[in-house]
Amino acid sequence: MSKVGIFFGPLNGSVNRVADKMKAALGEENVEMVSVNEAEVSDLERFDKIIFGISTVGKETWDSNYSNNDWNKFFPKISEANYSGKTIAIFGLGDHVTYAGHFVNAMGVLAKELMKNGATNIVGQVSTEGYEFEESEAVIDGKFIGLPIDEDFEPELTDKRIADWIEHIKPAFGL
Ligand SMILES: Cc1cc2nc3c(=O)[nH]c(=O)nc-3n(C[C@H](O)[C@H](O)[C@H](O)COP(=O)(O)O)c2cc1C
């Protein structure tokens, strides 16, 4: 069976930690981890099942001068691949207290870019109930386009959020 590619970044932070937990929940043998720090368009093309993991660091993320973000480098490559026929899910790290007005925005920005490039099968939408925030670009048609995780202020909820979400998306990934 083809593997799920977990494209994540940056390395060594909250996204990385959550990505590792996702891998364990999906079954290590079903997953290949791909750091966006080193990934190429050809890596995106290798997978028909992809989970993206991204954090929001500044409301404009990769357009900003916050250079310590592996996604800065990778984001332009996103639009060079085509996602039609691929099954995709996204999780996003954010901070719902300090950045309530931009909560997990990067997840929404990424999703919109994927949709522009043929992604029609983004799975794993999450109800906004249970999250406190003011605004988020990641809310599309009334739901989060993927799974928001807040390791800064709600780390105690992370494991259950991951477990519930993985159970929910597994069938779409053929697992
Ligand atoms: C400079 C900076 C800007 C941030 N901006 C946002 C934001 O706009 N929205 C949000 O939800 N979280 C924001 N955060 C919180 C991070 O997304 C959060 O701490 C996340 O867990 C970081 O994960 P990482 O260490 O894997 O990058 C920001 C954090 C930093 C340091």
Image (cartoon, grey):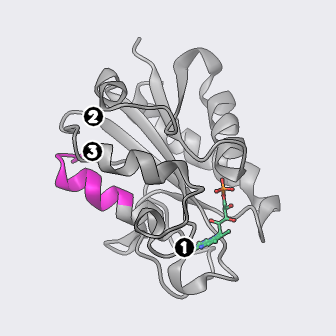
CB contact under 8 Å: marks 3 and 1: no
Secondary structure state at the residue bearing disc 3: loop
First in sequence: mark 3 vs mark 1: 1
* Image quadrant in which you'd find residue 8: top right
Residue drawn 32% across and 36% down? Answer: 87
Ligand 1 is within 8 Å of the C-beta of the residue at disc 2? no
Residue drawn 52% across and 73% down? Answer: 128
Comparing 161 with 119, the one in front is 119
Comparing 91 with 170, the one in front is 91
Q: Is residue 152 above or below residue 168?
A: below
Residue behind mark 2: 86
Residue 124 appearing in the image: no
Q: Is residue 42 above or below residue 57?
A: above
The residue range painted magenta reads 110-121
Q: Check residue 117 for magenta coloring.
A: yes
First in sequence: mark 2 vs mark 1: 1
The numbered mark at residue 142 is none
Residue behind mark 1: 58
Q: What residue type is labelled 3?
A: Asn
Comparing 38 with 106, the one in front is 38
Alpha carbon separation for disc pair 3 and 1: 28 Å
| Residue 86, x across and y down, in percent | 27, 34
CB contact under 8 Å: marks 2 and 3: yes
The count of marks equals 3
| Residue 123, x across and y down, in percent | 38, 47
Residue behind mark 3: 121
Alpha carbon separation for disc pair 2 and 3: 7 Å
Residue drawn 41% across and 35% down? Answer: 50
